[in-house]
Image: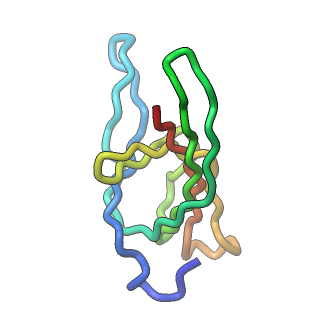
Amino acid sequence: MPTRASLLRHVITIQNPATVAGIQKWTKLATCYAQIMPESGSEHASGLGPTTVEMTQLTIRYQAGIKPKQRIMYGTRTLEISSVSNENENNRWLMLTCREVVT
């Protein structure tokens, strides 16, 4: 977890899923600064060719309402939130474990 705000260098957008007339769309929940740290990756074969799943850890300042099934937009990357951890339950930092599928 960062101890200084200067480590939060990346601007991200957090989005909520919404279904409108049977079509899934994404709505903006928040834009904030994050620390992004790649964790691991794995490669799988699929019918469309090799698929790589990248796991990434993001740290942001605490915000209520952040949960799995939401997603992060960072530049051209889309990261699906897998888990959310409120570090020490003190509402200061959120650790987001995200997955990115690259084909």
Pick out the residue farthest to the top: 22
Q: Is residue 5 above or below residue 9?
A: below
**Residue located 54% across and 32% down the image:** 51
Q: Is residue 86 above or below residue 50?
A: below
**Residue located 54% across and 46% down the image:** 81
**Residue located 35% across and 58% down the image:** 12
Q: Is residue 42 left or right of residue 75?
A: right
Q: Nearer the viewer, residue 78 or 3?
A: 78
Q: How many numbered dots are placed on residues in this image?
A: 0
Pick out the residue farthest to the bottom: 4
Q: Nearer the viewer, residue 1 or 37?
A: 37
x and y percent of residue 61 in the render? 47, 71
Q: Is residue 92 above or below residue 59?
A: below
| Quarter of the image where the N terminus is located | bottom right
x and y percent of residue 59 in the render? 52, 68
Pick out the residue farthest to the right: 88
Q: Quadrant of residue 32?
A: bottom left
Q: Is residue 29 left or right of residue 37?
A: left
Q: Quadrant of residue 93?
A: bottom right
x and y percent of residue 92 in the render? 55, 76
Q: Nearer the viewer, residue 97 or 89?
A: 97
Colouring: rainbow
x and y percent of residue 98 in the render? 55, 50
